[in-house]
Image (cartoon, rainbow, N blue to C red):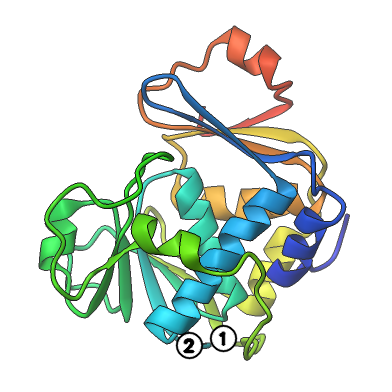
């Protein structure tokens, strides 16, 4: 596949051509393994997009800081932010110093310190609510997201020149929506294993390329041993950050 591939086009591929085949597989702590088909992944993105629009007033140009590790929910949030025309902000600056309209975090420390709107993301798949202290104005993602619709009917699209990704991590990166679509093109239908050591901006763009081509992303969280048995079981054909 060559050329540009927009996030809406990728989501369309996930819910149609890859509806029942694995799109995203997560290996987490305590032998946690989660497999999301293309349709299920799209459902999670739709629910999160609807939460963004209905609860957080998301629209093109809104800056969403993802203070999250390499994780399947991080990919869901990035896709939802791009589906709703927002700017994904990645930064290792202290909470409250990175310019963002919404901060999405799995850290109690960041949750307590962040300015403005904040969303608490419980990392466990079976966690139905945030387990720590939740500030009064914070949104509990796990408790709220399941109540939203499985489909996203769409709002205003971001213009090609709008910033899709702004990262100060590593060497830094800034991509417009046109550049993000360009970065998503040219992939192949591989099974890509991504380790927790990979740089998050690289993870996001690599995942887009794989999904645009109908492939599968396998994420391994921190502390997960990348054994030959795992590689063989998932039929891994390429690796990032391992």
| Residue found at x 50% / y 88% | 59
> What distance separates the C-alpha of mark 1 from that of mark 2?
7 Å
Residue 30 picture location, percent across and down: 37, 20
Tell me, yes or no, if residue 152 can be seen here.
yes
86 left or right of 19 in image: left
- 121 shown above or below 84: above
Residue 135 picture location, percent across and down: 13, 67
Residue 232 picture location, percent across and down: 69, 13
| Residue found at x 70% / y 24% | 236
- 63 shown above or below 124: below
- Dots 1, 2 in contact, CB < 8 A: yes
Residue 22 picture location, percent across and down: 72, 37
52 left or right of 212 in image: left
Tag shown at residue 162: 1
Residue for badge 2: 61
Q: Residues within 10 Å of mark 1 (few under 14, many from 20)?
A: some
Q: Residues within 10 Å of mark 2 (few under 14, many from 20)?
A: some
31 left or right of 234 in image: left
């Amino acid at each position: 596949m060559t050329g540009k591939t927009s996030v809406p086009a990728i989501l369309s591929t996930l819910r149609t051509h890859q509806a029942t085949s694995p799109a995203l597989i997560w290996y987490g702590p305590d032998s946690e393994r989660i497999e999301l088909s293309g349709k299920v992944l799209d459902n999670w993105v739709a629910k999160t997009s609807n939460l963004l629009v209905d609860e957080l007033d998301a629209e093109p140009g809104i800056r969403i800081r993802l203070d999250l590790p390499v994780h399947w929910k991080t990919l869901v949030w990035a896709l939802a932010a791009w589906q709703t025309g927002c700017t994904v902000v990645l930064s290792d600056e202290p909470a409250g110093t990175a310019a963002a309209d919404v901060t999405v975090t799995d850290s109690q420390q960041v949750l307590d310190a962040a300015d403005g709107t904040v969303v608490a993301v419980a990392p466990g798949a079976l966690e139905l609510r945030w387990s720590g202290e939740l500030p009064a104005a914070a949104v509990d993602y796990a408790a709220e997201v399941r109540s939203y619709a499985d489909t996203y009917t769409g709002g205003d699209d971001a213009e090609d020149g709008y910033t899709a990704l702004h990262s100060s991590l590593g060497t830094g990166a800034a991509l417009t929506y046109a550049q993000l679509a360009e970065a998503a093109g040219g992939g192949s239908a591989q099974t890509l294993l991504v380790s927790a050591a990979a740089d998050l901006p690289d993870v996001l763009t690599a995942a887009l390329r794989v999904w645009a081509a109908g492939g599968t992303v396998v994420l391994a969280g921190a502390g997960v041993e990348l054994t030959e048995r795992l590689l063989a079981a998932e039929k891994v054909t390429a690796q990032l950050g391992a």
